[in-house]
Amino acid sequence: MTVDTMRPQTTAALRQVIGSSRPISWINTAYPFAAAYLMVARHVDLTLVVGTVYFLVPYNLLMYGINDVFDYESDLRNPRKGGIEGIVLSRRWHRLTLWSAGLSNVPFLAYLLIVGSSAARLTLVVSVLAVVAYSAPRLRFKERPVLDSLTSSTHFVSPAVFGLAVAGGRASVAVVATFLAFFLWGVASQAFGAVQDVTADRAASIASVATWLGARRTVQFAMTGYALAAVAMLGAGWPGGLAAVIPLGYLASLAPFRRLADDGCEAANRGWRRFLWLNLVSGFLVTQLLIWITLRSR
């Protein structure tokens, strides 16, 4: 094999492996870690850099790479795959993706486990186990109704909890309220994301919170989760409680789908695409609030 023939294959492999890590979602796990760490440590150091890079790429490659390998058959039948919502990972690159996910995680996890306290280590272990258990064969938490939503939310909240723990922070009332609100937001978001696949999942005998509850009740479940997240966020006090308005934006976004029938579940994809953009707006608002809180505390 010549260099000229190897180059396109290498490019194709990189595109598939990186694509399976969902680049659009990298910020969703790196940002919570970095924000929590900085709020406690108040300075940039090696642990912040290593942790942010880890939750930016290797963590997402582990999470979504495993998912793309073991969901290959169902992804082939999913019309949403192939764009912003994830690729269909060619079977040719399955082994490479699994090896890349495992090996890329090892050095980061080794460092973070060494520098962390017992609480930080436990949080990181739970986080990684939740990532693997969601899609790995036999465990397949993603096919266990309600547990799928709880596990998915853990994927995004645990980096923030780890950031707090590894920086030496404490679980104050405001912190607990914030993490609870974040967790409820995550549960609601995963549930709504599953609505658009009700028909396809049932045809493929794949269980989820949405196939169990049905489209209409799952949307209402998700709306309830966002409403509870807003209430929980009020427990953060002033000015953190201002973030209670953020889940209300998601609640309003879901309202048009509150009576969605199972046979029309694919219409929820419009709401899911809006959800992806809402995340960017919400991230901006949270950042401004964190800056304000930081400046007030000086």
Image (tube, rainbow, N blue to C red):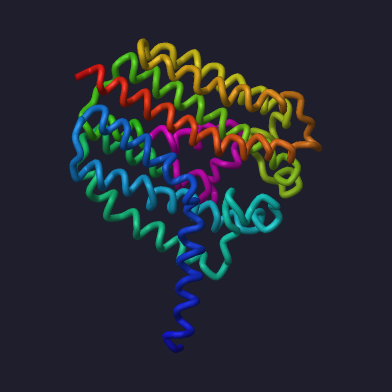
Question: Which residue is located at x 54 percent, y 58 percent?
Answer: 69
Q: Nearer the viewer, residue 156 or 279?
A: 279
Say which quadrant the C terminus sits in.
top left
Residue 220 % position (x, y): 67, 22
Residue 176 % position (x, y): 36, 19
- Count all numbered tags in the image, as a single digit: 0
Residue 28 % position (x, y): 44, 39
Q: In the figure, 41 relative to 112: above or below? A: above
Asked whether 137 falls inside the magenta stretch, the response is: yes
Whether residue 217 sits left or right of residue 161 in the image: it is right
Q: Main secondary structure of the magenta part?
A: helix
Q: Nearer the viewer, residue 152 or 6?
A: 6
Q: Quadrant of residue 219?
A: top right
Magenta part of the chain: 130-158
Question: Which residue is located at x 45 percent, y 26 percent?
Answer: 182
Asked whether 240 falls inside the magenta stretch, the response is: no
Q: In the figure, 7 relative to 26: above or below? A: below
Q: In the figure, 179 relative to 57: above or below? A: above
Question: Which residue is located at x 26 percent, y 28 percent?
Answer: 39
Residue 55 % position (x, y): 36, 45
Residue most toward the bottom? 2
Whether residue 249 sits left or right of residue 99 in the image: it is right
Question: Which residue is located at x 45 percent, y 47 percent?
Answer: 132
